[in-house]
Amino acid sequence: MASVIRPAVETWHSTGNYACLIPPSCPRARGDLVNARTREPTAGVMRPQPRPPDMDWIYGLPWRDRLDLQARETAPREARRRLMDDLEKWSLSQFGVSATLVVSEIVTNAVAATSALSVAGEPLPVRLWLLGGPAAVALLAWDASAEPPVRRCAADTDESGRGLAIIEELSALWGYYYPAQADGKVTWAIIDRP
Ligand SMILES: Nc1ncnc2c1ncn2[C@@H]1O[C@H](COP(=O)(O)OP(=O)(O)O)[C@@H](O)[C@H]1O
Ligand SMILES: [Mg+2]
């Protein structure tokens, strides 16, 4: 692990005041996720492969917000509140129920992954981008961990292991990618239904 973690940053288009994520470099395939000979995904079918969203489409979303959260247990609540406020401002409250559930799960996972890292120095943030347009909401969360999200088969009696299943159910698309020029990864979801 790098001794200094480089968070994903925004770049600014010279022609406007749009903030956007640095372009993804994807896939930075981990050895255990692809067959070394064929480069095909391995049979670990529950493992999503790293993939970015369609960044041209993301950059086309007219409403954007960004927030840095401290990686602690209050972060999911802060993310939900900010998202609800944004959706109201953007007249997109119809996506509120699904989008706040998804952001909760994404941020909860990002906080857990960050807490599992022991890095000296400044506490690591979880960085969240919230974007919206008339047809959909996009959520992207950077965390410092390079570990991928892994879908689990939660048994009836399990108290955890359902977050990604919830994200999958409520999102039109979701995934994660390793951003260029940054450490960690970005987990993302696009919600196009109330
Ligand atoms: N942002 C993340 N960073 C690293 N690992 C993650 C992340 N999100 C999910 N995971 C991995 O995927 C697993 C399944 O996540 P989830 O379905 O939300 O269940 P739970 O969080 O209850 O374990 C987690 O246990 C973790 O190993
Ligand atoms: Mg979880």
Image (spheres, rainbow, N blue to C red):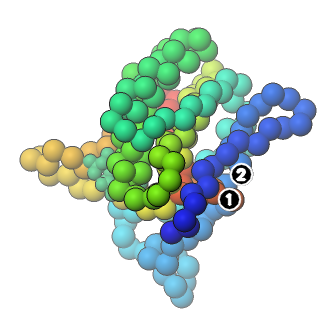
In the picture as drawn, the residue positioned furthest to the front comes out as: 121
- Residue at the image position 67 percent from the left and 45 percent from the top: 9
User: What amino acid does circle 2 point to?
Assistant: Pro
Q: Which residue is mark 2?
A: 23
Label 1, secondary structure: give it: loop
Q: Is residue 145 left or right of residue 25?
A: left
Report whether residue 136 is seen. yes
Q: Which mark is residue 180?
A: 1
Q: Residue furthest right?
A: 15
Residue 74 lies in quadrant: top left
Q: Amino acid at mark 1?
A: Ala
Q: Nearer the viewer, residue 121 or 136?
A: 121
Residue 66 is situated, as x and y percent measured from the top left of the image, at 61, 31
Q: Is residue 90 left or right of residue 171?
A: right
Residue at 55% across, 71% down: 29
How many residues crowd around disc 2 within 10 Å: few (fewer than 14), some, or many (20 or more)? some
Visible residue check, residue 98? no
- The percent position of residue 107, horizontal first and vertical second, equals 42, 39
In the rendered view of the protein, which quadrant contains the C terminus? top left
Instruction: Please tell me which residue lies in front, 114 or 138.
Output: 114
Q: Are marks 2 and 1 in contact (CB under 8 Å)?
A: yes
| 14 to 155, vertically: above or below | above
In the displayed structure, would residue 62 be above or below residue 40? above
